[in-house]
């Protein structure tokens, strides 16, 4: 396929690339920029694009906030638990849907995907009633609720990976004396590592950033509040004061783990997103 050598076309292409880059990165820059400003500078008009007197006071205030630190701990517990449960259940379901033969397999797959069609607000009240009546711990309630939107995606993606794996692998394992379960977790499961990393990371991000369920379910158990709820409830030192600097600093802190995970697993993520795109 011939490449465009027209300077105008190339210039337009790179202009669009740069425009998209600034459009997507500017909010992150502005968050970091605001987190380094004093309260007086944050209230200045017009706003400054660079801190005049950079300070780490907002970060010190955030790390001295016990509610924020407790929220970080709760978010880690909830997010990691959600990922582990989603991957364990999702891998078994995907193996069954991708490799086993039974009637109505396609219908079940689309029913699982259809679960993601319902907006959170439409099922929030019923979930809250169930969790309250069963007297479940708020943390457990959040983990079970988050799987409503992490598990269908996990099953759908992993199913396509299991389908793409050759059936000869399982047949060879059976010839060597392996049971169907051993063929699953010793032969097929390691080959789905890119998909597991990709779906696990996306499930972690969804659980880490979730706010609506967390705010509702922790209303009766404030000690279980996750970090998005803790940030939303930041208060100033005086009445009607919005601690914008602390909120921005907290936003930077909670974004760092996500960036670190993406950088560490970027190769696996690319493999997971592109596997199966080309056959042959």
Image (tube, rainbow, N blue to C red):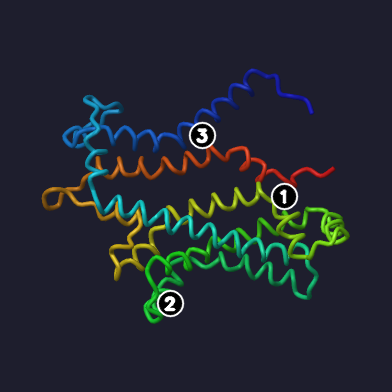
Instruction: Using the rendered view, name the quadrant where residue 179 is placed.
Output: bottom right
Inter-mark Cα distance, 2 to 1? 39 Å
Inter-mark Cα distance, 1 to 3? 35 Å
Label 2 or label 3, whichever lies nearer to me, is: 2
Instruction: Using the rendered view, name the quadrant where residue 181 is placed.
Output: bottom right
Q: Position of residue 25 (x, y in %)?
A: 44, 35
Q: Is residue 228 left or right of residue 66?
A: right
Determine which residue is flagged by label 1: 191
Secondary structure under tag 3 reads: helix
Inter-mark Cα distance, 2 to 3? 40 Å
Pointer 3 local density, CA inside 10 Å: few below 14, some 14–19, many at least 20? few
Name above or below for residue 232 compared with residue 56: below
Q: Position of residue 172 (x, y in %)?
A: 86, 56
- Dot 2 or dot 3, earlier in sequence: 3
Residue at image coords 56%, 52%: 200
Secondary structure under tag 1 reads: helix
Name above or below for residue 45 compared with residue 221: above
Determine which residue is flagged by label 2: 126
Label 2 or label 1, whichever lies nearer to me, is: 1
Q: Residue furthest bottom?
A: 133
Determine which residue is flagged by label 3: 20
Q: Position of residue 257 (x, y in %)?
A: 44, 43
Q: Position of residue 255 (x, y in %)?
A: 41, 43
Residue at image coords 70%, 55%: 189
Name above or below for residue 1 compared with residue 182: above
């Amino acid at each position: 396929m011939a490449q465009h050598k027209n300077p105008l076309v190339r210039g337009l292409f790179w202009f669009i690339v740069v425009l998209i880059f600034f459009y997507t990165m500017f909010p992150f820059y502005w968050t970091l920029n605001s987190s380094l400003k004093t309260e007086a500078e944050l209230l200045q008009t017009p706003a400054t694009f660079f801190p005049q007197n950079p300070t780490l006071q907002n970060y010190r205030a955030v790390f001295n906030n016990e509610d924020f630190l407790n929220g970080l701990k709760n978010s880690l517990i909830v997010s990691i638990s959600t990922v582990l449960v989603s991957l364990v259940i999702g891998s078994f379901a995907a193996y069954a849907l991708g490799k086993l033969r039974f009637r109505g397999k396609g219908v079940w797959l689309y029913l699982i995907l259809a679960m993601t069609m319902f907006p959170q607000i439409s099922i929030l009240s019923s979930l809250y009633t169930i969790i309250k009546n069963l007297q479940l711990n708020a943390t457990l309630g959040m983990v079970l609720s988050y799987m409503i939107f992490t598990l269908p995606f996990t099953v759908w993606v992993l199913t396509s990976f299991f389908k793409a794996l050759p059936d000869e692998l399982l047949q060879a394992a059976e010839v060597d004396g392996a049971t169907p379960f051993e063929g699953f977790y010793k032969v097929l499961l390691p080959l789905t590592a890119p998909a597991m990393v990709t779906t696990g990371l996306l499930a972690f991000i969804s659980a880490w950033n979730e706010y609506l369920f967390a705010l509702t379910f922790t209303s009766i158990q404030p000690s279980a509040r996750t970090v998005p709820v803790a940030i939303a409830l930041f208060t100033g030192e005086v009445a009607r004061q919005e601690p914008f600097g602390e909120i921005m600093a907290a936003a930077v802190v909670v974004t760092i783990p996500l960036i670190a995970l993406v950088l560490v697993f970027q190769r696996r993520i690319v493999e997971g997103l592109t596997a199966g795109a080309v056959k042959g």
